[in-house]
Amino acid sequence: MPRNSLGRGGFLRAGTGLVGGALLAGSAPANALAEDAAPLAIPESNKVLGAGVNDTPYGMPSKYERDVVRRTVPFLTAEDKSSVSFTPLQDLDGIITPNGLCFVRDHGGSPMDIDPLTHRLVIHGLVDTPMEYTMNDLIRFPTESHVYFMECGANGGMDYKGAQMQGVQFTHGMIHCCEWTGVKLSVLMAEAGVKPSAKWMLAEGADAAAMTRSVPIEKALDDALIAWSQNGERLRPENGYPVRLVLPGWQANLNVKWLRRLKFGTDPWETREETSKYTELLPDGKSRQFDWVMGTKSVITAPCPEKPMVGKGFREVTGLAWSGYGSVTRVDVSFDGGVNWQRATLQEPVLTKALTRFRIPWQWNGETALLQSRAVDDKGHVQPTHEQLLAARGGNAIYNKNSIQTWRVNPNGTVDSVQVS
Ligand SMILES: Nc1nc2c(c(=O)[nH]1)N[C@H]1C(S)=C(S)[C@@H](COP(=O)(O)O)O[C@H]1N2
Ligand SMILES: [Mo]
């Protein structure tokens, strides 16, 4: 048995088994430490003083992480003021998306200069007392913090008709998961005295798009949050500073940023244009309107096209699962395109309407493999295959693509996005 082996247990030794595989007696792991090894020499960082604590009043990632950034797809939109950037899911661990890496979707650019001292949130329409809140008013209310995912309804839409995007950043990166802090909307609604006749709420943003969305009163009263913090600090300008609407588990487009107005009424009348835009025609001639809840979904984030295999043997397969209906109860992983399935381990915490991290060990034999993950939630929803989704939605669909993703691992270790039924 080699002494000082960093690869204790043989995890990193090509071809040996982690699960059920025995170490061959006397064979040193590839990364066993030699007596005269370079890592034993004193490194430069031991010899000189480092940076001062005040050099970076606001900390930044290591320069070696400079490629871990939001990215865009140039052909998607002609104008970056009305476009989307994608979260680098392939580079993230755990379930929280760092604020600087949260995808951004704007219809009229991100206003970068909304002064929290002059910004107002107005609540009016069918209420007893119309209200006008400053940010200082809002933060005096009892607050709550919750970890929720937020996914654009168009996430994955580019791949509806076939595997087009070669990377998990682009197939699944219109999603982030943050700890949001704010006041429950129901608290503000009680204060304004929303009338029983009110059935809908119009939410409007202070951006150039003046984006408005209609929200049914039930959701507003349920778990909607008026949030000013994201992962412990105030919202980033591009994610809605100083305040946004958070509708847990629902299409991100309803989560109005730079929120300035909530109007209560009897109909979603003011937003007819919006409702027709987000309506899809189904194969049976009916249409899907008001399709707000993001479906049960998962994806393997490593390996993936951006994170290829580095040789045969052990590789932990990991990914993310989520459901707009509640919490993820189970994720199964297939290595043969959905013929056989194995149950993955869910990493705590497993939270409602949040990303859930899953893991499963894998011994790769170096042959072509088709990796898939399939999520199940606590309401019994099972993530559909792509064939099932197409049968239900037809070929015109763009939104809410939650079908199973397939990564093909090639013998040379590269990984491609492919579609198998
Ligand atoms: N005011 C306003 N709110 C908005 C938008 C917008 O353009 N303006 N875009 C919506 C869409 S389509 C999405 S997907 C989410 C994206 O939120 P994020 O930029 O914080 O990721 O914001 C939603 N809220
Ligand atoms: Mo969106």
Image (cartoon, rainbow, N blue to C red):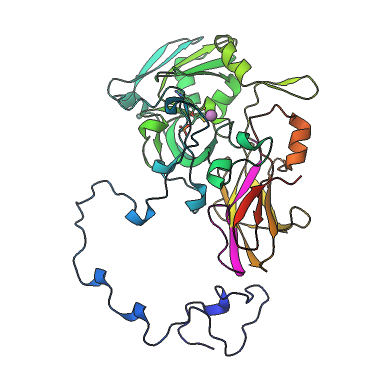
Q: Left or right: where does residue 96 sit relative to residue 319?
A: left
Report if residue 312 lies within the magenta region. Answer: yes
Q: Which residue is drawn at 57% across and 28% down?
A: 222
Q: Quadrant of the N terminus?
A: bottom right
Q: Left or right: where does residue 168 sit relative to residue 63?
A: right
Residue 175 at what x, y percent from top left? 53, 39
Task: Tell me the magenta residue range.
Answer: 295-317
Residue 371 at what x, y percent from top left? 67, 55
Nearer-the-camera pick, 54 or 311: 311
Q: Which residue is drawn at 57% across and 90% down?
A: 26
Report if residue 50 lies within the magenta region. Answer: no
Q: Left or right: where does residue 360 sit relative to residue 97?
A: right
Residue 212 at what x, y percent from top left? 50, 17
**Quick check: 133 above or below 177?**
above
Instruction: Find the residue positioned furthest to the right.
Output: 284
Res 141 seen here: yes
**Quick check: 87 above or below 255?**
below
**Quick check: 296 above or below 32?**
above
Residue 279 at what x, y percent from top left? 65, 20
Q: Quadrant of the C terminus?
A: top right
Q: Left or right: where does residue 6 sit relative to residue 369?
A: left
Nearer-the-camera pick, 273 or 147: 273
Q: Residue at x 56, y 47 (%)?
A: 167
Res 62 seen here: no
Q: Which residue is drawn at 52% across and 13% down?
A: 264
